[in-house]
Amino acid sequence: MPEAQLSGLEALKREAAVRAVALVESGMRVGLGTGSTAKYAIEEIGRRLAAGELSGIVGVATSEASDVLARQVGIPVEPLDPRPLDIAIDGADEIDPDLNLIKGLGGALLREKLTEVQARRFIVIADHTKLVSGLGEKAPVPIEIARFGFLSTIERLRALGLGGRLRQPGAQPYVSDNGNYIFDAALPQPCDALTLERTLKGTLGVIETGFFLGMAERAFVAGLDGVREVVRRG
Ligand SMILES: O=C[C@H](O)[C@H](O)[C@H](O)COP(=O)(O)O
């Protein structure tokens, strides 16, 4: 869509995406994120390929939807294999001052984490509404859980003191690309995300969480005064 037709927030998201895609070079293997911001990054990579600004790009998609979009815009897509990715670009639901993230409100957390952990550089793109002083301030943390015995798993999550609910947009629970359910957990504030992440990973029935801690190298965050580049400290 031409820039002039995008709403204010959408234009900001695209601006952040374009800044991140400027880091992509010919021949790179690129992790392709998921969501309404990552969509702009995929489109921009496609545009640069079509314009001859890039060549030899291979994309690894973090969701079925991003796989479809990438192919539509002419990005060759391959499955994730053990080779490192040069870069991954993705959106986020919350970003704290140390670039720890909550991701997965779009349901793609497991494939995103599997892909982004293999990237030499993981770049986050977002609009300014995603910035928080502590994780869980605005968004729940999505927890992907096995369908089998999910009610028992939810009881275990509640026993950890977590509020929240099974994601269920209609009559049936939401099913991820991997065939699992998602529990959107409300976090106590303030939240010790690292400790909670460790506890959750040791909880039977939990497959993955939407905490992306210490993974992002930098973020391009678009606000009304332009795009701010935030680099992780240490
Ligand atoms: O599962 C979805 C992903 O983690 C998204 O990257 C995240 O939800 C941000 O999406 P959006 O850019 O649409 O706000």
Image: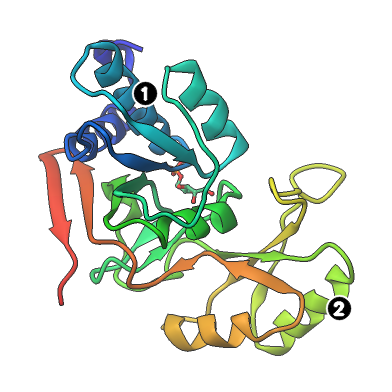
N-terminal label among 2 and 1: 1
Tell me the residue at 76%/84% (across/down). Answer: 156
* Mark 1 Cα shell of 10 Å, populated few (<14), some (14-19), many (≥20): many
Judged from the image, the secondary structure of the residue bearing numbered disc 1 is helix
Residue 138 percent location from the top left of the image: 44, 62
- The amino acid at mark 2 is Ser
Q: Position of residue 120 (x, y in %)?
A: 28, 58
Image location (x, y in percent) of residue 87: 30, 48
Kind of residue indicated by mark 1:
Glu
Disc 1 Cβ-to-ligand 1 distance below 8 Å: no
Q: Which residue is mark 2?
A: 152
Name the one closer to the observer, 115 or 139: 115
Instruction: Name the spot of residue 44 as percent of width and height, x first.
Output: 30, 24
| Residue 7 in sight in this render | no
Q: Residue at x 49, y 60 (%)?
A: 113
Q: Is residue 150 above or below residue 199?
A: above
